[in-house]
Amino acid sequence: MSRYRAIYAYAWDIAETGVAEAVREFQGLGLNTVTMAGSYHAGKFLRPHGRSGKVYFPEDGTAYFKTTPSRYGAIKPVENHLLQSRDILRELTENGGMAVNAWMVLLHNTLLGTRHPEATVANAFGDRYVYSLCPSHPEARAYAIGLARDVTQSYPVMGVSMESPGFAPYAHGFHHEFALNQPNRWLDSQLGLCFCDHCIAGAAKAGINAKPLKAQVAKDISDYLASDIDFPTDMAEAFWAADTRLDGELKAFLDWRCTVVTSLVAEIRDRVRKDASVAVIPSVARPTGGAWYEGSDLRALAEAAGAIEACFYEPSAARVKADLFDVKRRLKGSGELRGIMRPAYPDLSSKGEFLAAAEALVAGGVSGLAFYNWGHLRKANLAWIADAMKLFGQES
C-alpha cells in the first residue's frame, strides 16, 4: 500500500489552475494524494503563483462541497459561491489521477457562530466567542458530525482530516485581535475556558462543580486586569502550571474537556462512511503536546479516530525530531501517525533543514507526510517536496 504523500490545497487555487493541470503538478512532485479544504474559515492569503491576483480573501466559514441539509440539525453549512459554477472536489475525485482526502475545519467557524451564538464558547463572564462553536453544545456536535458524514457519503474521498474538533484557545481565530496589555499564557488560558450552560451541565454529570470555578476564574481575571501588573512570560507559564496542578476543580474540568472532544471524534468515526479514513489534526499549539488545553488527548483521539495528523510546524529539524519523540511517547503505539510540514518561512526556510526534518519524521516512523499549502508556497519551495519524495521513494 502506498504511503500517504499529500499536498494541502484550496478549491479556489485548483479552480484557477484547472484540475487536470493541478493533478499533473502534484504527481510531478511525487505525491499521491490531494487533501482539499472541504470546509474552511476566513483569511487573507498571499499566493505567490496566483494567476488572477496575489491576495485572496475566502468566504468565511463555508463548505466547498455540495451539502445535504437533511444530514444536519439546526446548524447547517453554507455552501461557497464557487459551487454555483464548479464542484472542484467532485472534479478531483472524477479525475482519478490521485487519491482525494477532505480537510474539514469543524468548529472554528465565525459565520455559523455569528448565526448561532448560543452554540458558541462562553467565557467566565458570559462573553461569546463567535469564532468557536462549543464541542459540548448538542447542535454544534450535530453540525460537526454531519459535516464529516456528509462529505464521505456524498463523495468517494479516501477519508477526512479533521481540524478544530475541540475548544479553541483565546488567542486564535478572530479578525484583528487587539489588546493594550501584554498577553501571557496565564491570562489567555483563563480567558479561553468555556463556561457555557452545556459545559457546566456536562461537567456536573461528571461530578465537577464548575459554577464556583467559573466565579473564581472571573474574579482572577478581573483582579489581574484591574492591577498594574504584566506577568512576564516565564512567570505566567509557572502560574498557569501551578493552577492546573493545585486547583483540583480546574484540573478535573480540563480533564473532562478531553472526554468531550474524544467522544465527539468517536461519534464522527461511527457516522462517516465505514471505509473512509479519519485523521485528527489535534491542535493549533506548538509543540503538539500543548493540545491538551483544547481538549485533545492525543492517545484517546488516535484510538477514537484511527489516526493523528500532527502539524510539525517548527523552525528546525531538531525541534521537529523532539516534537515527534514527544508525540510518539504520548500515543504509546495507538493509531496511525502522519505528519504535516511547511517547507517555507516561518518554519523550515532552508532546503537542507526541510529535508533533514522530513528524514527525521520518516525515520521516526510516521506513516505519511503532507505539505501545507500549495497555494501559499513559492514554486522553488514546492520543488523541495519533490526532492524529499525522491529521497524516500514512492512506496512505503
Image (tube, helix red, strand yellow):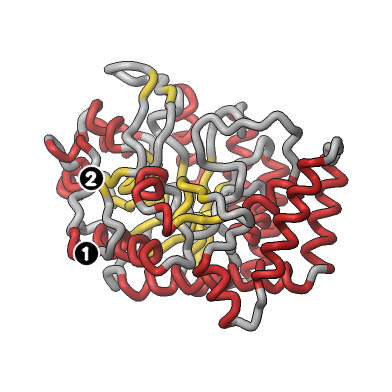
Please give the label number shown on residue 153.
1
Q: Is residue 273 above or below residue 394?
A: below
Depicted 12 relative to depicted 149: above or below: above
Dot placed on the residue nearer the N-terminal end, 2 or 1: 2
Badge 1 density bin: few <14, some 14–19, many ≥20, Cα 10 Å? some
Quarter holding the C terminus is bottom left
Point out residue 157 in the picture as x, y percentages from the top left corner: 26, 57
Quarter of the image where one finds residue 275: bottom left
Residue at 53% x, 61% y is 337
* Near-viewer residue (338 or 128): 128
Give left or right: position of 211 versus 149. right
Q: Residue at (24%, 61%) from the top-left corner?
A: 150
Q: CA distance from mark 2 to mark 1?
A: 17 Å
Secondary structure of residue under mark 2: strand
Can residue 32 be seen from the camera position used here?
no
**Quick check: 135 left or right of 95?**
right
Q: Nearer the viewer, mark 2 or mark 1?
A: 2
Q: Look at label 2 and name its amino acid.
A: Glu
Left or right placement of residue 121 versus residue 327 in this view: left
Q: Is residue 178 above or below residue 305?
A: above
Residue wearing tag 2: 79
- Where does residue 295 sit, x and y in percent of width and height? 59, 63
